[in-house]
């Protein structure tokens, strides 16, 4: 029997690692909300936070194409579905936060505003207030629009099971 310890012992997550993972999950969420928001919504929300901070563009905004991949049946083999236009932008605020944004389409202003808001959301002094005044209302509006579309789709749903029972 070999008494040697394994080369790599599994370690429990440190508090710093847990905080990093939680921050990444929160940022993934707010980035998805910002990417789906319209440019006028972003401008209104940014004005409501006291306006844009002084920032410098590091990249873009610039438009290009991105390959969209899909999976057969949602879990099968991956395939290239096609290309879509995206616009990206990266900014740095005077406080040192770097914000990134990728948005669908060619709206350079939307990408720039989303990147500025991403940088503000990372600011320890303003992040919580921006989450409450920007992300929460935008997410609620997006959820309401999704629910409305779902209600419209549900109204047109055909119950094939009921039709089959009616024939017999």
Image: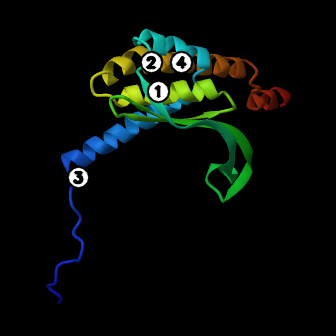
- Image quadrant containing the C terminus: top right
Q: CA distance from mark 3 to mark 4?
A: 36 Å
Residue 42's disc is: 4
Q: In this rendering, which labeled residue sits more in front, label 3 or label 1?
A: 1
* Residue with the mark numbered 2: 52
Residues at circles 1 and 2 in contact by the CB criterion of under 8 Å: yes
* Residue with the mark numbered 3: 13
For mark 1, give the secondary structure: helix
Q: CA distance from mark 2 to mark 4?
A: 11 Å
Residue 116's disc is: 1
Question: Residue at image x 45%, y 37%?
Answer: 28
For mark 3, give the secondary structure: loop
Q: Tell me where residue 133 appears, x and y as whole percent.
A: 40, 14
Q: Nearer the viewer, residue 6 or 57?
A: 57
Q: Outermost residue toward the bottom?
A: 1
Circle 2 Cα neighbour tier, 10 Å, few/some/many (<14 / 14–19 / ≥20)? some
Q: In this rendering, which labeled residue sits more in front, label 2 or label 4?
A: 2
Q: Outermost residue toward the left?
A: 3
Q: Earlier in the sequence, mark 1 or mark 2?
A: 2
Residues at circles 4 and 1 in contact by the CB criterion of under 8 Å: no
Q: In this rendering, which labeled residue sits more in front, label 4 or label 1?
A: 1
Q: Tell me where residue 68 appears, x and y as whole percent.
A: 68, 47
Circle 3 Cα neighbour tier, 10 Å, few/some/many (<14 / 14–19 / ≥20)? few
Q: CA distance from mark 1 to mark 2?
A: 7 Å
Q: Earlier in the sequence, mark 3 or mark 4?
A: 3
Q: In this rendering, which labeled residue sits more in front, label 3 or label 4?
A: 4
Q: CA distance from mark 3 to mark 1?
A: 32 Å
Residues at circles 3 and 2 in contact by the CB criterion of under 8 Å: no
């Amino acid at each position: 029997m070999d008494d040697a310890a394994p080369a790599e012992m599994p370690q429990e997550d440190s508090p710093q690692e847990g905080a990093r993972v939680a921050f990444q999950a929160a940022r993934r969420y707010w980035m998805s909300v910002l990417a789906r928001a319209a440019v006028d919504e972003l401008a209104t929300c940014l004005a409501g936070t006291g306006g844009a901070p002084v920032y410098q563009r590091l990249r873009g905004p610039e438009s290009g194409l991105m390959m969209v991949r899909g999976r057969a049946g949602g879990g099968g083999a991956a395939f290239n579905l096609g290309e879509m236009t995206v616009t990206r932008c990266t900014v740095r605020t005077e406080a040192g936060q770097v914000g990134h944004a990728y948005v669908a389409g060619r709206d350079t202003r939307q990408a720039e505003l989303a990147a500025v808001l991403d940088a503000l959301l990372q600011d320890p002094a303003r992040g919580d207030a921006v989450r409450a005044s920007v992300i929460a209302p935008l997410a609620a509006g997006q959820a309401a629009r999704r629910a409305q579309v779902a209600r419209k789709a549900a109204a047109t749903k055909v119950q094939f099971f009921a039709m089959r029972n009616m024939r017999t």
